[in-house]
Amino acid sequence: MRVLMVGDVVGRTGRYFFMDKTPELRQQKNIDMVIVNGENAAHGNGLTPNIFDELIKGGADVVTTGNHVWDNPTVLRIIDTEPFLIRPANYPEDTPGKGFCIFPVGRKKVGVINMSGRTFMSPPMDDPFRLGDKILKQIEKDCDVILVDFHAEATSEKLAFANYFDGRVMAVVGTHTHVQTADEKILPKGTAYITDLGMVGADNSILGVAIEPVIKRFLTGRPSKFEVAEGAAVYCALLIDIDDKTNKAVKVERIFIKP
C-alpha cells in the first residue's frame, strides 16, 4: 500500500496547486490513498463545505485539520456528517465532529487519527498521549493500518509522540508549522515519521501568507491583516510504503515540488 500524506493547504493558491498535482502524483507513483490537512484551505483560515468538496474532487480521500478548524464557522454544516473529515481528537468530548475515521483501501481498512499537540499551542487540549492509547484500543481491532496527523508546534513533542507510538501505528506525521523538515525516517519498530510535512501554498510567502503584512506586525507589534499569498506554489508531502503482509512502513519518500 502506498499512502501520500500532504501538508497544510493554504488558501486558493494551495488548493489549486493541490488539485493540479495530486491526480498526477496518484498516477505516477501508484498511490492508493491521499490524506491532506485542510485547516487553512479557506483563504488561510479554516475550511468550508465547498472547499472540502474541492479537496476531495482534487484527489484527497481523508481531510484532517488542526487548531484553525473553527476559523470559518460554515465547517459546522459538515463536521458531523462528512465521514472522512476529522478534527483533533483531543478537543473536549462535546466538540462537534470526530477525531478519527476508518477509510477502506481495497481489502484493507486504514484508520486515520488527528491529534493536536499542547506545547506552544492554543487552545489548551487534552493529553494526546493518553488519549491516543484510548483511541487505539477502540479502533485497532477494526484497522489493518493506522496513521496519525499530529498537529503540533514543538519538535520535541512530535518526536516524543512518535516514539511513544512506534510500532503501534504505521505513521506519525507532523503538521502545523508549514515548513517541511528533512528528517523523514522509519523508527525502530516500523513507524514512518517526519517532524513536519510542510505546506501546499505560495512559495514566495511567509508560511503561505503575503510577506509585507507579516513583516509589519513584527516591526510595529500591532495587528496587521494577513492575506494569502499568490503566485507559484510548492507542494510538500510524505509518501509512505506499507508492506501488505506486515502492515509496517518499509519506505518513506519526502515529496517537495517547486516550480
Image: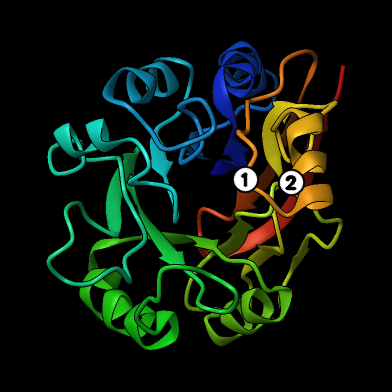
Q: Quadrant of residue 198?
A: top right
| Residue nearer the viewer, 175 or 103 | 175
The quarter of the image holding the C terminus is top right
Which residue corresponds to the image point at 47% horizontal and 78% vertical from the top-left?
168
| Residue nearer the viewer, 36 or 29 | 36
Q: Quadrant of residue 242?
A: bottom right
Is tag 1's residue or tag 2's residue first in the polypeptide sequence? 2
| Residue nearer the viewer, 216 or 124 | 216
The quarter of the image holding the N terminus is top right
Q: Secondary structure at mark 1?
A: loop
Which residue corresponds to the image point at 57% horizontal and 80% vertical from the top-left?
161
In the depicted structure, whether residue 227 falls above or below residue 46: above
Q: Which residue is mark 2?
A: 217
Which residue corresponds to the image point at 13% horizontal and 38% vertical from the top-left?
81
**Mark 2 packing: few (<14 Cα in 10 Å), some, or many (20+)?**
some
Q: Is residue 179 left or right of residue 102?
A: right
Q: Is residue 123 left or right of residue 86?
A: right
Image location of residue 113, percent across then percent down: 38, 60
In the rendered image, is residue 213 in sight?
yes
Q: Which residue is mark 1?
A: 223
Q: Secondary structure at mark 2?
A: helix
Image location of residue 225, percent across then percent down: 60, 33
Circles 1 and 2, Cβ within 8 Å, touching? The answer is: yes
In the depicted structure, whether residue 45 falls above or below residue 234: below
Q: Amino acid at mark 1?
A: Pro
Q: Is residue 18 left or right of residue 251?
A: left
Q: Amino acid at mark 2?
A: Arg
